[in-house]
Amino acid sequence: MAKVVERRKLNFWEELYLPAIAEGLGRTFKQMFKPEITLQYPEQRPVIEDDYRGAPGLVKDEEGREKCVSCQLCEYICPPKAIVIVPGEAPEDTAYDYSNIEKAPKEFYIDMLRCIYCGYCEEICPEQAIFMTREYELNAATRQELVHDKPRLYEIGGTRPGLIKKWKHKDDGRGAEDH
Amino acid sequence: MIKLTIDGQEVEVEPGTTILEAARTLGTEVPHYCYHQDIGIDGNCRICLVEVNGNTDKLTISCKQPCGEGMDVKTESDAVVKARKGVMEFLLINHPLDCTICDQAGECPLQDYSYHYGSGDSRFVEQKRNKRKKVEFSDKVVFDGERCILCTRCTRFFEEVRDCRPIGVENMGGKSTITLGPNGPIEDPYQLNIVDICPVGALTSQDFRFKQRIWFMDFAETVCPGCAKGCNITAGAYQGKLLRFVPRRNPDVNKSWMCDDGRLSYDDYNITERTRGAKVAGADASFEEALAKIGELVGDGSGVAVLASTSDTCEELHAIRTWAGKVGVTHLWHGAETWEGDDFLKEEDATPNTAGAQRLGFTPVPTEAPSLRGLVVAGDCPVPPALLADLDFLVLQAPVAGELGEAAMVLLPGLTRVEKKGTWVNCLGHAQKVQPALEPGPGVREDWELWRDLAGEDWTTLKAVTRAMEAASGSSSDTPLVASES
């Protein structure tokens, strides 16, 4: 049964509507002299807090070396299964000693249409190689463009000097004689 | 028989049984690294310590101590737990803890026992010992000295199973490491077994190196399709692609081993192009049309032979045989494929079910083959060219048609050896269950369903075929056709 709502009968002043219009316009004019809070995006940008969780990106260390060792823990933890990693061998023909690392991602994809910005990947990463960046502008003409590949992820992530000292060769001469 | 008590439970064992094995019969797993069922006892890792008759001053290694009459064994007493924790701490002192990049992670007893029996943190603040990393023992095996816990399972495998010594332990004390012998890289054709038995990630397979973390993979407990020995294996696949075969223990067939050729044959079954849907005279057709065409071509069966692949399961072969019997085809032949065998596990017959085919009444192709009107090839097998001469028609049912597909009047899809489900009988006469490791995808029907439809039988499940086969061929315990439920 539909409930019948009785309408209050309007009195004379209310039936004129003019007082209501005047009140409305009054509010409008009052607002014009208040400080502006609208942001003129994209010319103006919002202030992004430090703990903002934007698009995840891969980071390089201060010397431009990739930190990720493709352990695939982020792929494992990712709730919407947005991350796909193809593991591979670390490059050997570089100036750096890769003997303690051996492994590096051959391909690294994050499907931003799937990502829910939970930040688990950053939390679980044992090498501090993946971070939730402040990048929030994700627009593209095709779905494929929103599947971020390795170059795009490094572009988003940039450089972040970190605590990981995997590059420091462990050998201080005490253990390696005879080997 | 000897009676003893393990953790309060009484158990009776044969004389000579070790405490570890006795505990296993009770379902109690005593942790162990150096002990392995198929390469004997060494007793160097000390993780399997147990308390015997309340002696907490001197614990006993359960892998080597034979059971004694009236022994009172405790596997979880305070002294044992403390000692085990100590052993774990020592093992982890020089272990690099690089599980993030280690292929063994996820199937590593060091990880498991560290989780169950370790202390969870490290008191060791000194410099870890540096040893050689990424040493190529051969083009199949890589060695990492830092991860090694020197259980010597690998060297003992070669000494006791393969009767050779390509690797050994060099140096003493903390500097000990496994090293290649003077004769260079390992050449043994069973060398990849040391990767399986290595309890840590010190020995890893070059082939599987960094391919996929094992927790992302799907596993099927099946039988190696490589040869007639039928080694029990676990096939690992990732997203519809096989990545590895590893042996599964079966004391009657392959113990814990398999040959490298069989192990590395997995990639042969990752086929990219295959027959999908039926074809009649080169044109796409429905399965019903194709099967009707076969019936029409075969007619009363005179001058027609069936050549069945010996990689077909017994169930498939039974369905084929039933159909052939109904239409009057009397020539039931099986194909043959060979590769180089050896005197350990690898058989010369490179197909997994020759014994099953012969038990079901299929015979090898006679050297003086009678002249044929038509040939029905069932399954993936090489067809002797002599059979193809002067044929009126050829029916081919195979996963990959190849050149023969163009000559076939009727072409039907099929399953590869790793997609089949059913029974294979190995050369020792064991009927073994086969499980599919991959899915065939669209446009492919199970082989037995095709032949069932041709034969007009009403088997709805594979189990029904198995029962019909058992009833028709009198499968006995001496010549089984059906794998026992174990």
Image: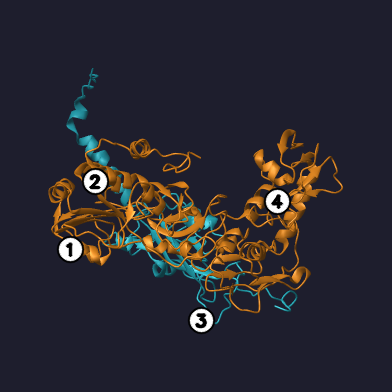
- Disc 2 and disc 3 on one polypeptide chain: no
Q: Which residue is mark 4?
A: B118
Chain under numbered label 2 = B
Give the camera-side residue of B108 and B125. B108
Query: Do the residues under discs 1 and 4 have CB atoms within 8 angstroms?
Result: no
Which label lies toward us, 3 or 1?
1
The relative height of residue B328 versus residue A136 in the rendered view (above or below) is above
Amino acid type of disc 4?
Answer: Gly
Label 3 secondary element? loop
- Residue at the location (21% across, 63% down)? B388
Q: Which residue is mark 1?
A: B407
| Chain A shade in the render | cyan
- Residue at the location (25% across, 66% down)? B385
Label 4 secondary element? loop
Quarter that holds the N terminus of chain B: top right
Chain drawn in orange: B
What separation in Å lies between label 4 and label 2 (alpha carbons)? 63 Å
Q: Is residue A122 left or right of residue B337?
A: right
Q: Which residue is mark 2?
A: B324
Chain under numbered label 4 = B
Visible in this render: residue B61?
yes
- Give the numbered dot on residue B474: none
The relative height of residue B422 versus residue A154 in the rendered view (above or below) is above
Q: Which residue is mark 3?
A: A93
Amino acid type of disc 2?
Answer: Ala
Query: Do the residues under discs 1 and 2 have CB atoms within 8 angstroms?
Result: no
- Residue at the location (48% across, 47% down)? B430
Looking at the image, what colour scheme do you see? by chain
Q: Residues within 10 Å of mark 3 (few under 14, many from 20)?
A: few
Which label lies toward us, 1 or 4?
1
Give the camera-side residue of A5 and B292. B292
What separation in Å lies between label 3 and label 4 (alpha carbons)? 39 Å
